[in-house]
Image (cartoon, rainbow, N blue to C red):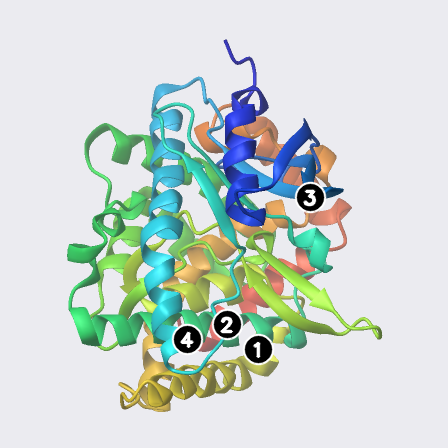
């Protein structure tokens, strides 16, 4: 019986992945699990890598694959939550992504910058996905604690725009995507029953440190009042922000686009030249602006958002327009319409900005274990760590204040 998620990986999985990648003639010689992530890098699933030796055309070669695995959560509601996410990701890569890429390529563009997917095990309780190892192509995570600068953020926004625009093209051809891709209907934000109550407790417990922090920081009473109300009604806020919206903004969205789920490739001078979108496990049918506000209020350095909002939206709009026009469709909204929709979805960005930013600046050693993070257990210990970080971690206060200043100026909490 498997004691940890890595034990679920079997030789047959590796052989199937190798055949998809290198062809049927590739012969597996050996394989080994090589863990490479740190605590805090992944919460919903277990992530590891497999190092492979194989023979092909009378020569020996090596390859590496990244594997996302069912994390084998012990608590029933946590397990149900994470299993839904990994099933959604399998569905996205096996069913949705090929059609998105086909539409994008037919318009003369490269495929979406998402890791190559090779194989999935779908047996309940043993689910896993095998991807290319992007480290082999020089991709790496940006320093999440420092946050993304404008150059990094623009690359992500342009790629998000290609993702969203391609979704618009498919919807124009085929209609409501939830009919064609049924797992888009499965969304934690619209959960009901026991799952909703579990998530209300989980997100509410993560809002408590934010409320306590706001009580310690002078001058943001309006945000404190908003956060206190939102903590009590957190699932209503999420549901309303995700479900409110209509054509032309309602598209297939990433759902979890923040710095932990992004990789970058750099040139010789150290400048970022390419962004890769990861972890498509929260894909949803929602306003494209939910992705934009989530990214920009959780992942940026300092005051980048306040100084660059218009530049970011213009970069996004130009990239979106390029795809839709090349595919023979008019751009379905004006730049002014985009600005308004972005403002309408700032409450979602603020909610996650308050939850995520205290964690994202933590050192790996201080991060709670995934089971604790997802269940909300031991929340008092976590809250005390975050409170101490307000003065002890020089990155937290400016990161948080940049978000607070922006939303106050934007009138989000009035």
Q: Earlier in the sequence, mark 1 or mark 3?
A: 3
- At numbered mark 2, what does the secondary structure look like: helix, strand or loop? helix
Mark linked to residue 105: 4
Q: Distance between the Cα atoms at labels 1 and 2?
A: 21 Å
Of 199 and 157, which appears nearest the observer? 157
Q: Which residue is mark 1?
A: 306
Q: Are marks 4 and 2 in contact (CB under 8 Å)?
A: no
Residue projecting furthest to the top: 1
Q: Describe residue 264's horizontal placement relative to residue 236 as left or right.
A: right
Specify the quadrant of the image occupied by residue 276: bottom right
* Residue occupying the point 50% across, 46% down: 20
Q: How many marks?
A: 4
Which of the two discs, 1 and 2, sits closer to the camera? 2
Marks 4 and 1: which is nearer the front?
Answer: 4
Task: Identify the element where label 1 is drawn.
Answer: helix
**Vertical relation: 321 (above or below) 347:** below
| Residue 304 drawn above or below residue 339 | above
Q: Position of residue 46 (x, y in %)?
A: 55, 32
Task: Find disc 3 in the rendering and name its residue.
Answer: 63
In terms of sequence position, does the residue under pointer 4 or pointer 2 come before the other?
A: 4
Element carrying mark 3: strand
CB atoms at circles 4 and 3 under 8 Å apart?
no
Place residue 203 in its image quadrant. top left
Which element type, helix, strand or loop, lies under badge 4? helix
| Residue 215 seen in the figure | no
In three-dimensional space, the C-alpha distance between marks 4 and 3, rounded to whole angstroms, equals 27 Å
């Amino acid at each position: 019986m498997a004691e940890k998620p890595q034990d679920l990986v079997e030789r047959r999985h590796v052989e199937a992945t190798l055949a998809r990648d290198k062809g049927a003639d590739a012969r597996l010689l050996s394989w080994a699990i090589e863990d490479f992530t740190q605590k805090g890098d992944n919460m919903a699933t277990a992530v590891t890598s497999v190092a492979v030796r194989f023979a092909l055309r009378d020569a020996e070669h090596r390859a590496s694959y990244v594997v996302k695995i069912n994390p084998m959560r012990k608590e029933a509601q946590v397990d149900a939550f994470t299993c839904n996410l990994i099933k959604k990701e399998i569905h996205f890569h096996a069913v949705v992504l090929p059609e998105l890429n086909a539409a994008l390529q037919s318009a003369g563009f490269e495929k979406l910058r998402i890791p190559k997917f090779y194989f999935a095990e779908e047996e309940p309780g043993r689910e896993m996905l095998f991807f290319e190892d992007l480290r082999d192509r020089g991709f790496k995570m940006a320093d999440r604690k420092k946050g993304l600068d404008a150059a990094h953020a623009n690359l992500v926004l342009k790629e998000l725009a290609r993702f969203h625009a391609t979704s618009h093209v498919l919807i124009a051809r085929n209609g409501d995507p939830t009919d064609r891709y049924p797992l888009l209907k499965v969304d934690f934000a619209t959960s009901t029953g026991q799952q909703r109550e579990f998530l209300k407790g989980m997100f509410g417990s993560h809002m408590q440190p934010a409320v306590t922090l706001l009580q310690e920081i002078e001058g943001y009473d309006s945000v404190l009042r908003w956060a206190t109300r939102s903590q009590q009604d957190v699932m209503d806020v999420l549901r309303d922000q995700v479900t409110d919206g209509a054509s032309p903004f309602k598209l297939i969205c990433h759902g979890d686009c923040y710095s932990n789920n992004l990789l970058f490739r750099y040139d010789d001078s150290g400048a970022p030249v390419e962004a890769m979108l990861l972890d498509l496990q929260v894909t949803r049918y929602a306003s494209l602006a939910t992705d934009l506000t989530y990214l920009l209020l959780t992942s940026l350095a300092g005051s980048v958002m306040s100084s660059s909002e218009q530049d970011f939206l213009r970069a996004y709009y130009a990239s979106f327009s390029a795809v839709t026009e090349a595919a023979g469709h008019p751009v379905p909204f004006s730049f002014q319409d985009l600005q308004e929709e972005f403002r309408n979805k700032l409450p979602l960005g603020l909610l996650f900005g308050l939850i995520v930013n205290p964690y994202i600046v933590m050192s790996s050693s201080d991060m709670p274990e995934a089971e604790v993070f997802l269940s909300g257990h031991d929340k008092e210990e976590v809250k005390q760590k975050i409170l101490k970080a307000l003065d002890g971690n020089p990155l937290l206060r400016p990161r948080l204040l940049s978000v607070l200043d922006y939303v106050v100026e934007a009138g989000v909490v009035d």
